[in-house]
Amino acid sequence: MSDNTTSRRDFLKGSAMGITIGAFATMGVFSYSPWRKSYFTEAERKQVDIGVCKSVKVTNISETSWFDNATLMHDIKNAGGLLVNQYDYNWPPFGNGKGLGKGSYQEGMSKLKQYLPNNLEKAWEIIQDNCVSVDNAGGYAALIEVEEMSGRKRKFLLDTGWSYAWTDECFKREGIDKMLENREIEALFISHEHFDHYWGLPVTLKYDDRIPIYCPEGFYEEGRQYIKDCGHKGEVTYVKPGLNKVIPGFASYVFAIPIICRVFGEQSLYFNVKDKGLVSVTGCCHQGIIRFAETAYTEIQYENDNLYGIYGGLHISPFDDWDPKYDDLVISLGKYGFEKVGCNHCTGVLCAKKFIAAGYPVIRGTAQHRSKDTAYLGNGDTIEFGNV
Amino acid sequence: MINTKTAGVNPMNISEIHPNFNVATPEAGIQELLRSILIRTNLIPGIRYRIGWRGLKDSSHGMEAWTARIDGLPGIFGISFERNDLKNDLQTGRFALYYFPSPEEELIERLSVKAGIQAQQQDYLEKVRDFLRHPEFQGMFFIGSVRLMVKSGGKQLMLELESMTRQIVISKNGITLPAGDEGVELVPPDGIDQDFPAFDTAYRFFRVLAASLTFNLGEPPVFLDCYQSPGPEYVSDAATGLCHQVESSRAEMRSVCLGFGLVEAKRDPTNTKENKGKFRLLNSLSEGETVPKEYVDELWWEAHRIGNFSAESGELSGIDNRPQLILVTGFLGSGKTSFLQHFIEYQGQMNRFTAVIQNEIGEVGLDAKLLDQGYAVTEMDEGCVCCTLVGNLKAAVNGILKEYRPDFIILETTGLANPFNLLDELDELKEILRFDSVTTLVDGLNIEESLDRYNTAVNQVKASDLIILNKVDLLDSESIKRITRILRHLNPGAPIINSSYGDVNPALLFDPGLTNRSTCQGEGPNNTKASDCGCHNHYHNSEDHHHHSHMSDDLSALKIDFSNAVDKDRLIGALSEIPQSVYRIKGVIDLQQYDYPMLVQFVGGRYEISRYPDADFNERYLIVIGQDLTDSFSGKSFKSSLEVV
């Protein structure tokens, strides 16, 4: 360095504003770094054709997974924390009467099995005697109606709630019970193995025990056994990480990620809506909004190359960012330019309000059936993407 | 003395990390494996902090990529997938490692001029966050390779770092940058453009990653080996725009490799023809052998014990489980509730739970319904905080700890409380919680009037570690400036953060980790733990201990400026003789014995002297707060008693 009185850093800092990186080629600085020259590969867009549909309508059956955070916090912390196997909590339905954190799938199931899936009232009585925090259980479930280009409408379920009592009540409220009985709903997609999305399975099976089920491959032994123990008689598919086409304009995608309470993998749904763009429907989005949107961008071909809409829980990253000034979710949603947003569940009410304050096109709800704020697309509310 | 695990004969259980690790799709599998290690370690705040993570960000773009900050370094690491090789039953996932120094960091000087300029650009951190989209940019910050190797379908796992001790680039033509009329020659012809300590930097990341692997597998490594071989350096030529490699006598390539699980074969880079004679073995350690001294302290031998839940104690082992306590003060209507709402939701998203203790006078307490989600609220008796809370606080905190085990406890005191009286009480709770700060919400619309009329408002500002100036959306910039000046005058030390609707990103305010704002953080390089540093000195005057209610509003503050360093022993002597009327002393001064600024804190007869983390902080002063100071305390004689003549 020719000038020993200033450090290079200070000099560069002072002059950085006036120097353009492009000027370097003529200044005697090599044009690329010597270490990396062979590995400059831009990520390739695969843009798989998943077909196209006319519209998608989502009915929020329930987004209230539990009713009291303090109870949930008490239970998780006192059972040993966030890495403990969820089947050990002694939460409904898997109770053995031994108290918090001392449960097991087998002991809980042995008391219930004979009543599943047809006598859920009796099962729920047993659950109330043997489980902890029974009344805190709610659940997450959504009805998806896809309209094909021909005009034919097809129905699917995303998730099946937690509490048998609450889930059944919500199913009846939205007429899901009848749709299942009439075999109008073609398949049940489970976003991930978490209690609030999956443990209400017998309620679906009570009305239709042959419904095909699609779970992420990361399901653990207990979760796989539960399907059998609930008396399911249909086909079960464990979807491998990656893209899984379902019908024209509809594909699911499984993300291989670890989730708290010993769960692995999350399955999200993508819809390619004619003239609009891609619509994404999530359970919790544990993979993070960035991975979710990035995956859509690189993997799927969609109308107008436009990320059109999103529905569901938009879990922000559970980690601390290295830059606390970066407001991950709010910035990301803006960056990807969604035109229609329906959020709830794990999004956070204040976060939803921030979206609204930022001018994002959030579709507001009616705050009914124990959903608490109109910033959420709440229980019983619907959102439509495309010309329904 | 640590031995490696004696029997390296058990197949390791890779399903602990990834239940469906699939050797049939190796390229996806190896990326998923790294992702799982990083995410699983970072799910629980106490664990990620203990292992050394200080922030993590998914930076994937087509390929797996992460950016992260780790303990002890201000810059950001990047790691991204490059390729996967499958040879017999050994699958090798190769990842590139980057270090993006902080623009202020001295390490930036060791990178190329071009990288140095990049780091000073406005969009530097944005590019870092998305480094895969900027291949040329990322290339300037490359520091080494990390290999994740899976053998025998998952029975053996190896983690290796390979990096240069010095990454040297010579600039054949030299580098002159435009400055003034002539330009400044930053690098003379044939001078060194870059000389980066790549291995030492990369190793800092490697050890955190290795400890994460131990934590996830639930078992420590069974072998370790390290090799070194002569490495090249590079010459850049402006004429061609290219670099070429030359032999170097000063740069070496070094590798360190850890093996987990069943040991079938250790790696031996010396056994190929071309490598013969080049490599020298620095260290090799097999199962059952004693770990050499330089590696004994590595967390990767012990991290499998972190976070084990003990049913008896109800605690997770190896991590500090004490919740952080934040005392939130502010007048009625200053925005405490809004602030709390944001705080609680934010922490909830980060898997951290918050409990609230309230103490309000004549006001209906913060209602759980107001917050839209139930959370732990313990309402304490109505009454003055200084009368009823003192003595009750411990019971309330114990109750909450037993019931909820929260990560944060927020003690929300009424708009009328005098926070000084609580500070003593808080000190007695050290065993069960970590005191973070006194955070004061200031209502920007009314603060000037409040300060004029109520000494309690003045005290709240004075007692703060953090001031949040709320409702700035309703103020013009002149008012904000004026109020900031007033607050700064009352409390020169506390950061003032502007907000609207109480919406402040808590990560900006509160260290998510275990540092303790108000306790000693160690005086020297050997004292890094708060608990065992030598600068702590306690003495209690319990019989003379008296409480001051908000009724006795005659507190005053005194600022003493220092232009010279003072003697440590004289300071300790003077602090031991502080009169009863002084409640608090706080400030930053230079001590002759240390060449960095020191934070002095004195509360209720106890004092702490610790290193002040911001070396660039230029003010040197002590604020003295007490009752009737004019009669009982002279700032002038206090100062002269400290200064060495």
Image (cartoon, helix red, strand yellow):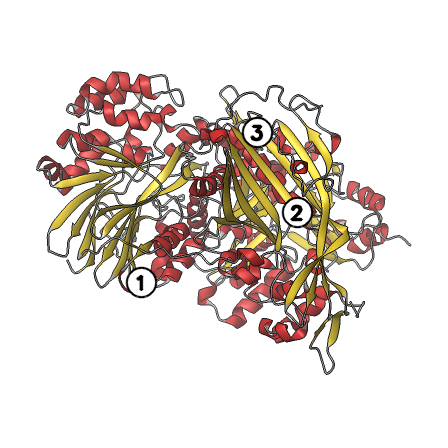
Residue extending furthest left?
A182
Name the residue type under label 3: Phe
Q: Chain of mark 3?
A: B
Q: Residues within 10 Å of mark 1 (few under 14, many from 20)?
A: few
Q: Is residue B277 left or right of residue B45?
A: right
In front of the other: B522 or B250: B250
Q: Total marks drawn?
A: 3
Marks 3 and 1 sit apart, C-alpha to C-alpha, by 45 Å
Tag 2–tag 3 contact (CB < 8 Å): no
Residue B199: horizontal and vertical position, in percent? Answer: 68, 47
In front of the other: B450 or B537: B537
Label 1: which residue? A305
Establish whether labels 2 and 1 are both on one chain.
no
**Which quarter of the figure is the N terminus of chain A placed in?**
bottom right
Name the residue type under label 1: Asp
- Residue at figure coordinates x 81%, y 53% from the top left: B639
The image's mark for residue B260 is 3
Query: What kind of element bears circle 1?
Result: helix
Q: Chain of mark 2?
A: B
In front of the other: B224 or A306: B224
- Residue at figure coordinates x 65%, y 43% from the top left: B203
Residue B615: horizontal and vertical position, in percent? Answer: 72, 55
Frontmost of labels 3 and 1 is 3
Label 2: which residue? B163
Residue B207: horizontal and vertical position, in percent? Answer: 63, 39
Q: Is residue A283 visible?
A: yes
Name the residue type under label 2: Ser
Query: What kind of element bears circle 3?
Result: strand
Q: Residues within 10 Å of mark 2 (few under 14, many from 20)?
A: many
